[in-house]
Image: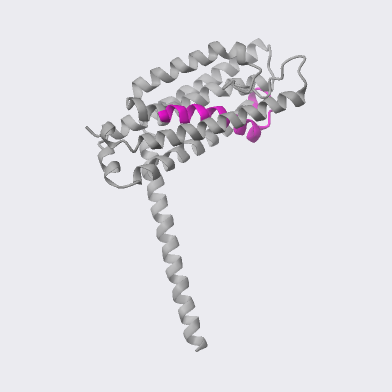
Amino acid sequence: MNEIMQISGKNKGKTGGKKLKNLLDLTGRMVKYNMKIIFANRFLWFLLVAFLVFILISIIAVLDNEGLDISFIYGSLLLPGVLLLFYPTVFGIQNDDDARVLEILFGIPDYRYKVWLVRLLITFLFLYIILVCFTWMGAVLVLPVPVFEMAGQLMFPLLFIGMLGFMLSTMIRSGTATAVVLVLLGVGLLILQGSIDRSMWNVFHNPYNVPRRMNEMLWARVTLKNRLFLVSGSILFLLYGLLNLQKREKFIK
């Protein structure tokens, strides 16, 4: 009896191991396939431009040697971060349409949600890794900064902007038009930044740039409220974008 139970346990273990192996294999293939779509040849150009922009800003700052502090490093990394997530989030729907993948996605119930959630997860994971590399370079070449903490702080506004771009792409369905709208919104936010600079509503809030005559504890509270606002907005943009993906007739002509 004991031998039968041992054999049964071994068989169950083998079956469970095969299922886990198949699941990991399927996940690996799905991630690899989506990486090819997300990080197409155009993304390499965005990565190169983001790197050059960061290097150029750093060189100018070192030569001028004015206002070179931790808040400057944060600001200098924000623009390259926007450039890195711009292509995957804004042009994703258009790329699927150009590759004739949209019909396949809409033909499988709820599969499109899983595909886009995986793509967004991969995009922001790679964005964080690249930001860690850029921040480390800034810490070595320009000014010592907390690498992982700063990369994490940068992810809040970038997550907000990326999810906004994703939502707009599901509404407009054209990468170029979505890019124009997103740029105009960004310019509008920059114009309004002077009036909302010290409030929680500032998308480009710099947690390291403590205003003069403001208590650091009060600034930390503003930063916490700002981060909650950005996360809440990101979740709403994601949910609305996924909801737009239900409207098959607007995507398949």
Q: Could one spot residue 44 in this view of the protein?
A: no
The structure residue drawn at horizontal position 56% and vertical position 29%, both measured from the top left corner, is 230
Where is residue 20? Give x, y as percent. Answer: 45, 61
Residue 213 in view (yes/no): yes
Q: What colour scheme has been applied to the protein in the rendered image?
A: one colour
- Closer-to-camera residue (91/245): 245
User: Who's the residue at 40% across and 60% down the image?
Assistant: 22
Q: In this view, does 151 lie to the left or right of 220?
A: left
Image location (x, y in percent) of residue 86:
44, 26
Above or below: residue 249 compared with residue 204:
below
Quarter of the C terminus within the rendering: top left
Stretch of the chain drawn in magenta: 139-167
Q: Residue 61 lies in what quarter of the image?
A: top right
Task: Count up the numbered dots.
Answer: 0
Q: Position of residue 151 (x, y in %)?
A: 60, 32
**Residue 186, horizontal then vertical, whole percent:** 49, 17
Which is the main secondary structure of the residues drawn in magenta? helix
Q: Residue at the spot x=39%, y=17% of the render?
A: 180
Indicate whether residue 224 is drawn in magenta. no
**Closer to us: 168 or 11:** 168
Q: In this view, does 33 lie above or below 50?
A: below
On screen, residue 1 above or below 188: below
Q: Which residue lies furthest to the bottom in this view?
A: 1
- Which residue is found at the position 35% from the left and 46% from the top? 110
Write down the quadrant of residue 32 in the picture: top left
Is 154 colored magenta in this rendering?
yes
Left or right: 68 in relation to 133: right
